[in-house]
Image (tube, helix red, strand yellow):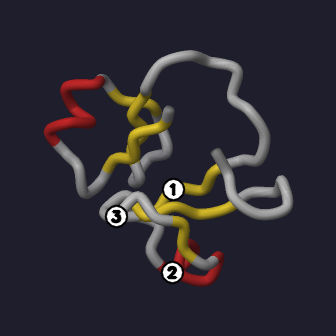
Amino acid sequence: MSKGNGGSSYRSAISGRYVTTSHGKASPRTTVKESGGKSGSSGDHYRSAISGRYVTTAHGKASPHTTVKES
């Protein structure tokens, strides 16, 4: 779930914590830009911090520093 005013925010792929917009823009390989609001999907999914694309669960677990687990 996004934090803040409902807009987009950035999250670190390494720590999972929300980071400032300036850090997110400066570190595109290890941060993911998240949109505000509910996604509508169920279950956990992994997304690459590098490409922004969804990846398989196996890849997400094998690459914890460059993927983000989304619930």
Binning the other alpha carbons within 10 Å of mark 2 as few (below 14), some (14 to 19) or many (20 upward) gives: few
Q: Which residue is mark 3?
A: 15
Q: Residues within 10 Å of mark 1 (few under 14, many from 20)?
A: many
Report how far apart the C-alphas of labels 3 and 1 lie in the structure. Answer: 12 Å
Q: Give the percent coordinates (x, y) of residue 31.
A: 46, 63
* Image spot of residue 46 (x, y percent): 39, 34
At x 14% / y 39%, what residue is drawn?
62
Front residue (pair 26, 13): 13
Q: Nearer the viewer, residue 4 or 29?
A: 4
Q: What is the secondary structure assignment of the residue under circle 1? A: strand
Amino acid type, label 2: Ala
Horizontal placement of 65 versus 28: left or right? left
Does the CB distance between marks 3 and 1 fall below 8 Å?
A: no
Whether residue 61 sits left or right of residue 29 in the image: it is left
Residue at the image point whose x is 20% and y is 36% from the top: 61
Please identify the quarter of the rendering in which residue 65 is found: bottom left
Q: Which residue is mark 2?
A: 26
Q: Nearer the viewer, residue 51 or 36?
A: 36
Quadrant that contains the N terminus = top right
Q: Is residue 22 left or right of residue 56?
A: right
Instruction: Tell me the quarter of the picture where residue 14 sits.
Output: bottom left
Name the residue beneath numbered marker 1. Answer: 32
Q: Quadrant of residue 21?
A: bottom right
Earlier in the chain: of badge 2 and badge 3, it is 3
